[in-house]
Image (spheres, coloured by chain):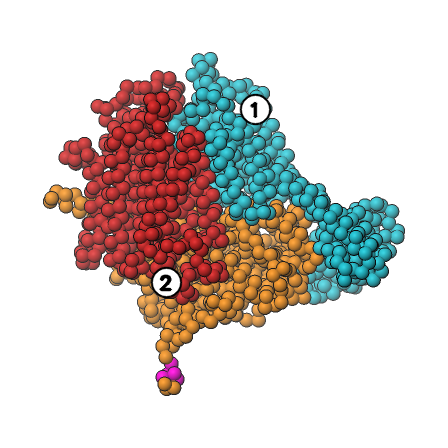
């Protein structure tokens, strides 16, 4: 019996050692790729004089295409903050992990970052499914996640700050623009997307919105394609048929990889932007790098940031990025661009840093309290604030037309930042819901406050 | 290391594989949960919470690997749809977990959140019954089993074998993945099923629940191993092995090969479903990317790394490869694919017997594998694991390349 | 031409105003300026002179046409201005001496269907001599005439639509078939007749479109599968890294394009021609390397090649990601592959797709030639049919294996050249093609290259026929299930040799 136990304990220790990160320093090439993450190897120590920041973006698999840049920009921002002396007298230290576009692995890595590495905050996720996968972990362990990508809304978590756009900060202004005289006065709409939750929800909200603008269902065509779909011959031919008779526009929520074949097919079948404009919510500067822009001239995208925005803040942001790319010798070199989720990561990290400075601690509860009232002069040139109530950013909306140089020419913008609607008023089930993490609501999806206000008590 | 292992081996005697599995299961289902829940946090022996989940997850993979080894290592069927069976079991359990959320979802509706989202007014018929744990548990075993049985019945009857079978099963997984990706199919589309709250009334976020699940996974591995060991040790197991080596001869001897294959194949699928059902409550999400064609290839790789035709080796391979993946993705996020890719190539080239061969515990079953390879490979007895059981070289056609390769130990098995 | 001053302004409204003024000025030089603006060839220098970049890239003054050394920034326009420009250019071109330009102008005006253009078009119809332009004018005017008060004009319009076979107008005709909407029975009868004739035409056009689109889809399937038909079909190597060789071919195309862009900008549009041999050689080299380093140790163990090549595919993806970055890279269609031609009404076949079909035919012919008509092919067939016997005849089977594998990989690389013209070029490119490729080879019958050809086109057309009925996702699922069923019936594929060899894999 003793032998058995001895063997078992020995094995347990073996496994323990094998899976812990107490390993010799990593090779040189690794340090090059993730310069600030060297401390990821050291065990978490309460007395350490660094603040750990988790970066949870896929560096391999299908999402690496989009998420790698966010890792880079997060590391850049950390370097920037460190160069200014760090936070609370401590340096920031990035802990980079690769969840490999694998959703259960996202949850596992989130748990590892929070429990094993003891990070103060995590910047990460791109797809909705990855966010949904890590959400229970963050709620259970009371972690803090900054999520930088435009998404379908219908969510507000106590443990997440959403620095990307909710549908009312991107989709609805874009459709309003297309219906306007200037935008072409569209009367008929093709809602074309990849079959997953973001397009489905956005299109659902848009359908309700279009109904409210007296567009009938006959003039709306909804179409979904699988992930990685690359054959748009039939769909483009159908759009062409559908467009006969009324001014038509295509609202595209096609996911990254399918966009190139779609636009190529569109152009080659002779559909021009001035006749049937396509407005995309997932095509930004980074995606355009891989697309021949000649056939795209005039097609639209709606974002909260464009690289072509002409403000001093943006110039500084772009210059910092270019310097960083050069200094780190990242692949792509001077062809690298900035885009909306990168800006959102940058803003998010600065907001978090400000909140830490203000709170005087990295304690999650204190930082969350402070974060809700931060403002930051964003590269888009607006002084934007993080909403204490619904944990979303107030964001300006820009609509840009694709130009030959892979940039967007801004044709329309909002006057100021718009507050996010975490719950869309256009969806009956969620229209009554309120996301408000301040007293007396303290709830992400309630129809009435959790706590009675003093007024209510007085009435009683 | 080696003398210690030799002593261990001598001590364990012929039941080496069983011994390895027993140790593994004891660790997973007793040591880890106890070190997590009972041992105080300050102790060096304390196992942190997140580690328990990782171990539990890896153990589920190990069950799948054992199931895969049954059909691949012993029956010679390389299935590329085991990930599908695994995911189906996971979905069945996920459906129960979804239903047990009750009205605590985002929309406080009786329906799962994603259905509210898609404007569904009532539960589709195929969700009926999943309110009950016993029904979901049954379905987790039945659905993969029935699909495997039906698919296998037609495939084996048509004598689809070898590579053809692999490719066809891959097509099946791919079709299923596309189907599950559709939101209209009713399984949550790309997001799959997530945001589970509790299982049988126990909250899933409690470390104690997870420790129990981890222990159950360990027990599950023991059970799966025991079943598979019983099958391969039985007369049916010997027929399977014979079929793997020369199927026509077995058929001509009057055995109904379809029945034997079908039995092993269906059992393997059921075990995968079982593993999937254990997996989902621990990782908290099930979605169609589990059915990716590459996931199935990876299952085969776990088995190959551990050692094909050994059962215990398969489990070790699954633990090792996935443990490595878990560790490397955090330690070397930019370079881990190089390590893993190289490992796969090196194992296939240099260690056809996998880790079990490396540590000198190559199974007897392994030696006959050479027979079901295409003629043209010279068998080099010197590299065969246990010399006592080495068969005489069955194939004598000499291939110029294979003989050069055997110098490196590649073609030796 | 004072209006030109507007282009120097940055505001869109000023440009729009200038465009309108220019269009209505009647100046013969206006059309050239407008077209330059539309094609983004109009520049404004620092002194607010308006310049046009001609075909050779030289700047000329917009007014005098004299060459100007100065350069400026491009005048930017948006969709609003593009819409105005299109109409203005079409109105001006309606009087062009070139019948092709007139035809294009009529098409443009018909698409806009502005009331105010009808008189100009009627005017043009009276002077028009060329038949095709006349027909276009008649049908363009017919749409407006359908709403006319005069029953004769309505009848004429219906007949014009029938003659022109304008499918797009069928919904409008439907309104003329019922009594209260259309009082004249003759018009009603003509309208119903026209609708049914349009309907027949529609069925034909749809069928033809499905076949054409299916051919195009099939040719892509075939190109990515053809290399596999050699490595898997002839050599029994389950090459999971085949997709990555396709990817390498695509990246070779990218590299060639970058090289041309930097060193031979004059001939940039020809980069694609050069990319074909480059991709072939690059993929062959990688393939030969893989064969020598890994694959040759695994012959006769097909299932293990699957595992090793899966590892190789992970490595290749990560290597490419490290070199070129995780993002997609830009591969442009050369100008001679941009655009398309309208075969039937609403059935436009893009040039790049046509080129892929032709390219596929050439590659199939190339592979057939190599295997049937060269000494290498003879050896390849000898070795794959009877290895020991071939070895006895003095053939170096090892070298033949390397060549065969490299050939299969090279053909995969050629597939990459074609794919780069249709979709993304990124590290994950190969992952998307591998499942389909295997299916094509297995369905066609392993070892039968002709089988792969039939299977690829069959799957392509089936997919396109199902897509409008079932949607893209279900259509694909049905195709996959159909393949599984076919293989149940014919386990060795559509074109397998019947007989005893069936047991051996």
> What are the residue bounds of the magenta stretch?
A453-457
Q: Which mark is residue B102?
A: 2
State the residue at coordinates (62%, 63%). A216
* Quadrant of the frame with the N terminus of chain B: top left
Q: How crowded is mark 1: few (under 14 residues within 10 Å), some or many (20 or more)?
A: some
Which SS class for mark 2? helix
Q: Which residue bears the numbered disc 1? A: C370
Give coordinates of residue A376: x percent, y percent.
46, 69
Q: Where is residue C329 in the image (x, y as percent from the top left)?
A: 53, 46
Chain letter of mark 2 equals B
What color does chain B have in the rendering?
red
Residue at screen point 56% across, 50% down: A259
Residue at 47% in and 50% down? B181
Camera sees residue C59:
no
Q: Foreground mark, 2 or 1?
A: 2
Examine the structure image and report whether residue A455 is included in the region drawn in magenta: yes
User: Which residue is located at x 25 percent, y 54 percent?
Assistant: B211
């Amino acid at each position: 019996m003793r032998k058995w136990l001895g063997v078992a304990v020995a094995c347990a220790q073996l496994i323990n050692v094998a899976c812990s990160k107490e390993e010799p320093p990593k090779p040189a090439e690794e340090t090059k790729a993730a310069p600030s993450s060297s401390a990821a190897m050291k065990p978490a120590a309460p007395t350490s004089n660094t603040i750990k920041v988790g970066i949870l973006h896929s560096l391999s698999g299908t999402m690496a295409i989009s998420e790698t840049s966010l890792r880079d920009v997060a590391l850049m921002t950390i370097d920037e903050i460190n160069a200014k002396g760090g936070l609370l007298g401590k340096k920031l230290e990035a802990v980079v992990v690769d969840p490999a576009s694998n959703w259960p692995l996202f949850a596992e890595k989130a748990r590892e970052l929070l429990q094993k590495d003891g990070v103060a905050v995590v910047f990460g996720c791109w797809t909705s499914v990855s966010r949904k996968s890590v959400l229970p972990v963050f709620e259970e362990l009371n972690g803090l996640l900054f999520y930088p990508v435009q998404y379908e809304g219908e969510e507000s978590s106590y443990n997440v700050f959403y620095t990307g756009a909710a549908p009312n900060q991107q989709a609805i202004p874009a459709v309003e623009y297309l219906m306007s005289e200037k935008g072409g006065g569209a009367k008929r709409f093709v809602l074309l997307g990849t079959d997953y939750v973001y397009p489905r929800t956005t299109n659902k909200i848009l359908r309700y919105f279009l109904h409210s603008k007296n567009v009938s269902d006959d003039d709306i065509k909804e179409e979904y394609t699988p992930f990685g779909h690359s054959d748009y011959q039939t769909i483009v031919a159908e759009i062409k048929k559908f467009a006969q008779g009324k001014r038509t526009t295509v609202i595209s929520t096609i996911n990254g990889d399918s966009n190139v074949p779609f636009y190529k097919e569109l152009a080659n079948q002779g559909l021009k932007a001035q006749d049937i404009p396509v407005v995309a919510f997932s095509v930004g500067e980074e995606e355009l790098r891989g697309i021949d822009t000649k056939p795209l001239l005039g097609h639209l995208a709606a974002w909260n940031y464009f690289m072509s925005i002409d403000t001093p803040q943006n110039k500084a942001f772009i210059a910092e990025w270019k310097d960083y790319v050069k200094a780190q010798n990242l692949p792509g070199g001077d062809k690298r661009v900035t885009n909306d989720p990168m800006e959102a990561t940058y803003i998010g990290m600065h907001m978090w840093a400000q909140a830490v400075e203000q709170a005087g601690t990295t304690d999650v509860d204190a930082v969350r309290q402070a974060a809700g009232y931060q403002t930051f002069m964003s590269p888009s040139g607006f002084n934007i604030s993080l909403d204490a109530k619904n944990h979303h950013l107030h964001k300006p909306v820009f609509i840009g037309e694709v130009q030959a140089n892979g940039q967007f020419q801004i044709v329309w913008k909002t006057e100021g930042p718009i507050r996010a609607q975490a719950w869309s008023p256009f969806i009956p089930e969620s229209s009554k819901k309120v996301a408000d993490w301040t007293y007396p609501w303290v709830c992400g999806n309630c129809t009435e406050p959790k706590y009675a206000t003093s007024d209510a008590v007085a009435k009683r | 290391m080696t003398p210690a292992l030799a002593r261990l081996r001598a001590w364990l005697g012929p039941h080496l594989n069983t011994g390895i599995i027993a140790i593994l299961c004891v660790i997973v289902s007793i040591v880890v949960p106890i070190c997590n829940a009972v041992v105080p946090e300050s102790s060096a022996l304390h196992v942190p919470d997140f580690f328990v989940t990782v171990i539990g997850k890896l153990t589920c993979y190990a069950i799948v690997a054992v199931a895969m080894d049954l059909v691949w290592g012993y029956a010679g069927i390389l299935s590329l749809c085991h990930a599908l069976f695994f995911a189906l079991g996971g979905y069945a359990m996920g459906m129960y977990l979804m239903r047990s959320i009750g009205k605590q979802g985002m929309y406080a509706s009786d329906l799962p959140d994603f259905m509210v989202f898609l404007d569904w007014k009532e539960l589709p018929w195929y969700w009926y019954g999943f309110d009950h744990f016993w029904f979901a548990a049954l379905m987790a075993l039945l659905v993969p089993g029935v699909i495997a049985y039906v698919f296998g019945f037609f495939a084996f009857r048509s004598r689809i074998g070898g590579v053809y079978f692999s490719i066809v099963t891959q097509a099946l997984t791919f079709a299923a993945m596309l189907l599950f990706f559709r939101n209209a199919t009713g399984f949550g589309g790309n997001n799959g099923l997530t945001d589970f709250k509790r299982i049988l009334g126990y909250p899933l976020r409690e470390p104690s629940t997870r420790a129990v699940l981890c222990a159950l996974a360990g027990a599950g591995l023991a059970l799966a191993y025991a079943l598979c060991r019983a099958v391969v040790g039985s007369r049916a197991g010997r027929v399977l092995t014979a079929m793997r080596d020369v199927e026509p001869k077995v058929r001509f001897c009057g055995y109904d090969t379809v029945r034997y294959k079908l039995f092993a194949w269906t059992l393997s699928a059921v075990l995968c479903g079982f593993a999937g059902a254990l997996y989902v409550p621990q990782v908290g999400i099930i979605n169609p990317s589990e059915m990716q064609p590459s996931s199935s290839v990876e299952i085969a790789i776990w088995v190959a790394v551990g050692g094909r035709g050994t059962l215990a080796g398969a489990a070790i391979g699954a633990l090792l490869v996935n443990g490595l993946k878990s560790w490397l993705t955090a330690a070397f996020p930019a370079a881990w694919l190089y390590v893993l890719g190289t490992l796969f190539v090196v194992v296939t080239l240099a260690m056809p017997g996998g880790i079990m061969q490396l540590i000198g515990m190559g199974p007897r079953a392994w030696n006959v594998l050479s027979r079901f390879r295409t003629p043209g490979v010279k068998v080099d007895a010197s590299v065969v694991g246990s010399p006592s059981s080495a068969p005489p070289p069955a194939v004598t056609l000499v291939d110029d390349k294979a003989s050069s390769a055997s110098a490196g130990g590649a073609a030796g098995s | 031409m004072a209006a030109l001053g507007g282009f120097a302004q940055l505001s869109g409204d000023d440009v729009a105003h200038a465009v309108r003024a220019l269009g209505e000025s009647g100046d013969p030089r206006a059309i050239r300026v407008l077209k330059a603006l539309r094609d983004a060839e109009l520049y404004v220098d620092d002194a607010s002179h308006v310049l046009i970049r001609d075909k050779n890239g030289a700047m000329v003054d917009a007014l005098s046409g004299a060459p100007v050394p100065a350069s400026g920034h491009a005048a930017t326009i948006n969709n609003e201005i593009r819409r105005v420009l299109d109409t203005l250019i079409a109105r001006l071109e309606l009087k062009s001496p070139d019948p092709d330009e007139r035809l294009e102008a009529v098409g443009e005006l018909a698409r806009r269907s502005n009331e105010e253009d009808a008189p100009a078009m009627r005017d043009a119809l009276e002077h028009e001599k060329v038949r095709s332009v006349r027909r276009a004018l008649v049908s363009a005017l017919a749409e407006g005439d359908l709403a006319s008060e005069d029953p004769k004009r309505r009848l004429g319009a219906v007949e014009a639509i029938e003659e022109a076979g304008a499918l797009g107008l069928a919904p409008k005709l439907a309104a003329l078939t019922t009594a209260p909407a259309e009082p004249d029975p003759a018009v009603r009868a003509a309208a119903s007749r026209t609708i049914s004739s349009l309907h027949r035409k529609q069925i034909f056009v749809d069928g033809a479109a499905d076949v054409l689109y299916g051919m195009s889809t099939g040719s892509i399937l075939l190109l990515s599968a053809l290399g596999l038909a050699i490595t898997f079909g002839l050599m029994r190597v389950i090459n999971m890294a085949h997709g990555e060789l396709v990817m390498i071919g695509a990246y070779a195309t990218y590299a060639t394009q970058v090289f041309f862009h930097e060193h031979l900008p004059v001939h940039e549009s020809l980069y694609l021609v050069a990319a074909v041999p480059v991709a072939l050689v690059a993929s062959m080299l990688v393939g030969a390397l893989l064969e020598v380093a890994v694959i040759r140790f695994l012959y006769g163990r097909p299932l293990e090649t699957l595992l090793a090549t899966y590892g190789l595919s992970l490595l290749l993806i990560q290597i490419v990601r490290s070199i070129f970055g995780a993002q997609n890279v830009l591969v442009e269609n050369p100008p001679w592959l941009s655009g398309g031609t309208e075969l039937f009404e609403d059935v436009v076949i893009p040039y790049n797709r046509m080129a892929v079909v032709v390219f596929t035919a050439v590659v199939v012919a190339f592979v057939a030639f190599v295997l049937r008509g060269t000494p290498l092919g003879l050896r390849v067939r000898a070795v794959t049919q009877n290895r020991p016997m071939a070895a006895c005849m003095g053939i170096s089977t090892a070298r033949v294996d390397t060549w065969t594998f490299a050939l299969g990989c090279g053909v995969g690389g050629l597939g990459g050249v074609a794919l780069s013209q249709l979709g993304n070029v990124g590290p994950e490119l190969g992952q998307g093609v591998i499942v389909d490729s295997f299916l094509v080879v297995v369905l066609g019958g392993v070892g039968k290259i002709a089988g792969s050809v039939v299977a690829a086109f069959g799957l392509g057309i089936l997919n396109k026929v199902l897509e409008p009925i079932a949607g893209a996702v279900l259509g694909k699922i049905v195709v996959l299930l159909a393949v599984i069923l076919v293989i149940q019936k014919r386990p060795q594929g559509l074109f397998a040799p019947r007989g005893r060899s069936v047991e051996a894999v």
